[in-house]
Amino acid sequence: MTDETRDIALTVNGAAVARTVKVRQHLVDFLRHELEITGPHLGCEHGVCGACTVRVNGRAVRGCLMLAVQADGAEVATIEGLTASGEVADLQEEFVKRNALQCGYCTPGMVTTAAELLAAKAPMTRAEIRAFLSGNYCRCTGYQAIIDAVEATLARRLAKR
């Protein structure tokens, strides 16, 4: 593996960050090890489990598939940033109310992905919600409570329009 490095500058959860990183360092490793942001988790390291999901320039991406150097100039939001902004407060309340989180390992990625779904402000069926979240694995809840939480939050947001 190469030890080549690059300087990057990006915004993470609203704060400007500049660092020198190894060119092969994954974004999730950069966030966790360099910035000590522990919400995004490293699960499968193949982009299939969704535990590492973060938002880059407004889109949910897999932090284990994106290199930190690819985020140069980008705006990155983790679950910590989404929580601090209040954007997902209602969704997080529903997760707690419905026990849609158990061990919590998948929860940051699940909520980050669901935030993208909710931002579309479009009606969705349970099947469509399930399909949207299908790239996020949960080994504890059986998904029903998660779908319930997202469905309830979506319905409440759409009713407020």
Image (tube, grey):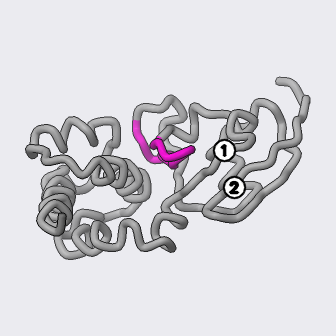
SS at mark 2?
strand
Residue 70 in the image, given as x and y percentages of width and height: 70, 33
Which residue carries the number 1 mark? Answer: 74
Q: Which mark is residue 145?
A: none
Residue 64 found in image quarter:
top right
What residue type is disc 1 on? Answer: Ala
Is residue 16 shown in magenta?
A: no
- Nearest to the observer: residue 8 or residue 96: 8
Residue appearing at x 13%, y 48% in the figure? 123
| Viewer can see residue 10 | yes
User: 115 or 29, which is in the foreground?
Assistant: 115
Residue at image position (57%, 41%) is: 63
Q: Are marks 1 and 2 in contact (CB under 8 Å)?
A: yes
Image quadrant where residue 5 sits? top right
User: Considering only vertical position in the picture, is 48 above or below 161?
Assistant: above
Residue 97 in picture, x, y percent from top left: 19, 75
- The percent position of residue 7, horizontal first and vertical second, equals 88, 41
Number of residue marks: 2
Gap in angstroms between the C-alphas marked 1 and 2: 6 Å
Q: Position of residue 14 (x, y in %)?
A: 64, 64
Residue bearing the label numbered 2: 11
Quadrant position of residue 92: bottom left
Span highlighted in magenta in the image: 49-60
69 sits left or right of 51 in the view:
right
Furthest toward the front, the residue is 161
Does the magenta run of residues contain 50? yes
